[in-house]
Image: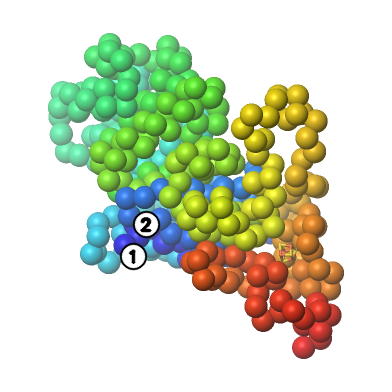
Amino acid sequence: HDTVLTVEDLRTYFHTDDVIIKAADGVSFDVPRGRTTCVVGESGCGKSITARSIAGLVQPPGRIEGGHVWFAPEPGRDPVDLAAMDPTGPQIRKIRGGDIGFVFQEPGASLSPMYTIGAQLARAIRLHQPISKAEAKVQAIEHLARVGIPSPHTRFDAYPFQLSGGMNQRAMIAIALANDPALLIADEPTTALDVTTQARILDLLASLQAETGMSMLFITHDLGVVAEIADDVAVMYLGTVAERGTVTDIFDRPQHPYTQALLESIPAIGDQPADRHTRLPAISGIVPQPSNRPSGCPFHTRCQFAMPGLCDVTAPRPLTLETGQLVRCHLRDPDIDDLPPQVVQDE
Ligand code: SF4
Ligand code: MG
């Protein structure tokens, strides 16, 4: 099928004095054109670094060590490899803010407190289009209206501190979409917002997608958001993709013990708030530090199905199931399913 983005074995490592942190260690997934792929996982699993790697936003001491990020803004054109570009070079800077828009969790990450949102939006437009200031202002006001900012003529002259969190997030979306990107990357764009505002922003993104046909890569820790917005899902754990599939696969037929545990940790609709507090967390233990990743299957220290002698020794290979889902777990490997772990290990 036609994909706008294909991430292939992406490796992004951070080199410190004594350790190498493998924040993304062989990450693969794709974003079909015009659709939304969610990357989901707990904090520290490498999902933000994956998003930043794609857009050339990894800061030293981090760097992309290997893999490919194939990006095809238009169908039928040969893709370019974003991972092979100099992250500080002109090529990726032209793409970022142009064919790729980026929305962060904190508006402060891309909105300056020093300038009006109108000035910042007009500047983003003029960085990528050879038009006059007056023309950019006209466009900017249209963009503010399009993201649902009321009285856009007046709000053009507002500073970020004069707007609510939700309005700032809309302004940031307007900047990200100013040059009609083929791909919008959104890293936890609604996490800092209250539930009502969050729902409105998700609705806005969905309607902008329907209007423009843009593809979205959406990073979140929240499975409720995934259910709301995803077509396809990649579940990350400690720098690797544990499982990926369509949103229906992931919610109805999860195959990886980590995905299953994540789903069990969502409070059921109708649960009383008191139940939510008394409920035991479904995933025991904490995420190990990425600098100290367990051997074998990275999830084995928390997995209730871990098979000693196998899961702590051998990393599971990626398996494509009949449903098209991809999963990394020995339990799903037909070659070793019926064999005692020790026998496999001795082979
Ligand atoms: Fe659990 Fe083993 Fe599967 Fe990893 S490979 S998820 S430890 S059963
Ligand atoms: Mg993050």
Does mark 2 have its CB less than 8 Å from ligand 2?
A: no
What percent of the width, then of the height, locates residue 161? 45, 14
Task: Describe residue 333's horizontal placement relative to residue 189 as left or right.
Answer: right
Quadrant in the picture for the C terminus: bottom right
Res. 339 image quadrant: bottom right
User: In the visual, does 182 lie left or right of 62?
Assistant: left
Is mark 1 in CB contact (under 8 Å) with mark 2?
yes
220 up-or-down from 83: above or below: above
The percent position of residue 31, horizontal first and vertical second, equals 40, 55
Which residue: 57% across, 42% down? Answer: 223
Residue 68 visible: yes
Q: Is residue 176 above or below residue 345?
A: above
Q: Is residue 133 visible?
A: no
Left or right: where does residue 105 sit relative to residue 21?
left
Image point 58% across, 57% down: which residue? 253
Residue position for label 1? 1
Does dot 2 land on a helix, a strand or a loop?
strand
Check the image and name the residue furthest to the bottom: 347
* Residue found at x 37% / y 25%: 171
Image position of 56 with respect to 172: above or below = below
Between the C-alphas of marks 1 and 2, the distance is 7 Å
Identified by mark 2, the residue type is Pro
Q: Residues within 10 Å of mark 2 (few under 14, many from 20)?
A: some
Q: Mark 1 falls on what kind of element?
A: loop
Which one is in front, 268 or 312?
Answer: 268
Instruction: List the residue tagged with mark 2.
Output: 32
x then y, percent, for residue 247: 49, 51
Q: Earlier in the sequence, mark 1 or mark 2?
A: 1
Mark 1 residue type: His
- In this view of the protein, which residue sits in the foreground, 14 or 219? 219
